Image (cartoon, rainbow, N blue to C red):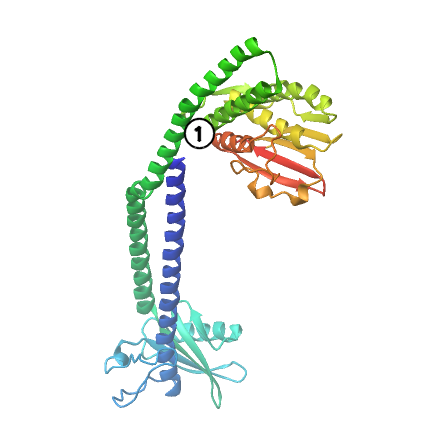
């Protein structure tokens, strides 16, 4: 149980750390791309405002952006480090002239092709290849300014890659520290759990000895005084206490690790049929009908004894709480893994807290009048299923049927 708690803590911590670092990287990526686009847009705006030519440097002029008001990228060297070209077309998109003096990798024909691609798209701003462009409506037609963003793209990609590597490395370091310190984090819970198990074990030994002595003395008293209702009450309560002690011990063992399971391959269909047959006469004596639907030849690898006990607990619970002259349904099917379902008619299903049925000592009857049940059986059933890496749930069907579904993985 403690190992399971530790694994869950590590898993949830890993998910949380991964989500947080992913959001951080997403924020870095978003800001980086916005800054790249803003930088390139500031250049295209400056060139388009100067009729397709790079404006001369003016130390008194501010070139900040509304998105980055404190950002000014223009220096005396910006003109010489910026590669750009401009194409002018008329209102019918017919080529008029071009300016490719500030770039060596683009010819006039290539400039025309880039312009046609942009005009077909109909966007005012955007990227084509590694060029940031802007379309401007001028008196004769349109001017399209292209600024080479290869260097900016390379720097942005490298920055994002470095950020990703740093965040990934941080994630592994944090997860390593979580794994290392998780044992210390669950130590108080482990100590409390061990004390609880030791308490149950000690209580079992301390209670069984006087209980055995009481029941033995009852036999002596009955032989001398004969049977009477007082002695019968003492014997009944003594046996009830003995059954409770045995169930608490069994539940404590179920909570331990899975190493005590006797795992082997067995015919689950045969085991189910054999166990259900023991309850047919019991259900009939209680005036209830038990129907079964067991798919043949379902094999399973697990602890056969515990699976028998699981089926017995679910059927015993169904017989006890089924309505008078009600009906019980037992089904065993297999998809990816075996599925056990037990359903029974129960008129008070709407008043039942289904999410609490597997709690220890939980009883639907708030008065806790004794009906032969301590409220531990379903807790044991849940522990058996979990020890087999499965899950068990309670559900209601309609207004008068309660069911239990156990998936054995």
**Residue farthest toward the front in the current orientation of the protein:** 225
User: Against 389, is 232 above or below?
Assistant: above
Q: Is residue 300 visible?
A: no
Q: Is residue 198 visible?
A: yes
Residue drawn at x 35%, y 67% as measured from the top left: 32
Q: 91 or 384: which is nearer to us?
A: 384
* Image position of 299 (left or right of 18): right
User: Against 130, is 42 above or below?
Assistant: below
Residue drawn at x 38%, y 26% as measured from the top left: 202
User: Residue 383, position in %: x, y?
Assistant: 49, 32
**Residue farthest toward the top in the current orientation of the protein:** 223
Residue drawn at x 51%, y 27% as measured from the top left: 244
Per the image, the residue denoted by label 1 is 252
User: Residue 345, position in %: x, y?
Assistant: 71, 35
Dot 1 falls on a residue whose secondary structure is helix
User: Against 283, is 24 above or below?
Assistant: below
Q: 372 or 181: which is nearer to us?
A: 372
User: Residue 251, position in %: x, y?
Assistant: 47, 29
Q: 137 or 367: which is nearer to us?
A: 367
User: Against 177, is 363 above or below?
Assistant: above
Q: 4 or 280: which is nearer to us?
A: 280
User: Residue 22, position in %: x, y?
Assistant: 39, 56
Tell how many labels: 1
On the image, which quarter does residue 71 sit in? bottom left
On the image, which quarter does residue 167 sit in? bottom left
Residue drawn at x 72%, y 43% as measured from the top left: 399
* Image position of 87 (left or right of 164): right
Instruction: Say few, some or many: other residues with alpha carbon within 10 Å of mark 1 (under 14 / 14 to 19 / 20 or more).
Output: some
Quarter of the rendering occupied by the N terminus: top left
């Amino acid at each position: 149980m403690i190992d399971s708690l530790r694994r869950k803590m590590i898993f949830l911590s890993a998910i949380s750390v991964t989500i947080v670092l992913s959001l951080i990287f997403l924020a870095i990526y978003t800001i980086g791309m916005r800054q790249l686009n803003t930088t390139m847009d500031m250049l295209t705006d400056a060139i388009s405002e100067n009729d397709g030519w790079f404006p001369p440097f003016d130390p008194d002029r501010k070139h900040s952006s509304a998105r980055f008001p404190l950002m000014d990228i223009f220096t005396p060297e910006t003109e010489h480090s910026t590669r750009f070209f401009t194409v002018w077309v008329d209102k019918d998109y017919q080529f008029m002239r071009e300016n490719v003096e500030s770039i060596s990798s683009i010819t006039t024909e290539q400039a025309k092709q880039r312009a046609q691609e942009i005009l077909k798209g109909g966007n005012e701003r955007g990227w084509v290849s590694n060029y940031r462009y802007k379309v401007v409506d001028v008196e004769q037609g349109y001017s399209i300014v292209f600024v080479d963003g290869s260097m900016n793209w390379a720097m942005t990609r490298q920055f994002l890659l470095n950020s990703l590597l740093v965040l990934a490395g941080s994630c592994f370091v944090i997860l390593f520290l979580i794994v290392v310190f998780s044992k210390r984090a669950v130590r108080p819970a482990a100590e409390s759990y061990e004390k609880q198990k030791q308490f149950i074990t000690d209580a079992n030994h301390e209670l069984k000895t006087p209980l055995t002595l009481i029941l033995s003395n009852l036999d002596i008293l009955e032989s001398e005084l004969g049977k009477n209702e007082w002695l019968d009450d003492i014997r009944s309560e003594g046996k009830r206490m003995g059954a409770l002690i045995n169930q608490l011990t069994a539940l404590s063992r179920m909570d331990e690790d899975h190493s005590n399971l006797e795992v082997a391959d067995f015919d689950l269909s045969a085991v189910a049929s054999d166990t259900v047959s023991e309850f047919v006469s019991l259900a009939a004596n209680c005036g209830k009908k038990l129907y079964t639907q067991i798919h043949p030849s379902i094999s399973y690898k697990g602890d056969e004894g515990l699976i028998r006990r699981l089926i017995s607990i679910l059927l015993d619970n169904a017989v006890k709480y089924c309505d008078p002259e009600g009906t019980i349904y037992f089904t065993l099917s297999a998809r990816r893994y075996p599925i056990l379902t037990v359903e029974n008619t129960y008129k008070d299903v709407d008043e039942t807290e289904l999410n609490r049925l597997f709690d220890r000592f939980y009883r639907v009857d708030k008065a806790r009048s004794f009906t032969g049940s301590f409220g531990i059986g379903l807790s044991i059933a849940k522990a058996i299923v979990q020890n087999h890496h499965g899950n068990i749930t309670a559900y209601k069907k309609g207004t008068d049927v309660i069911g239990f579904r156990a998936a054995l993985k």
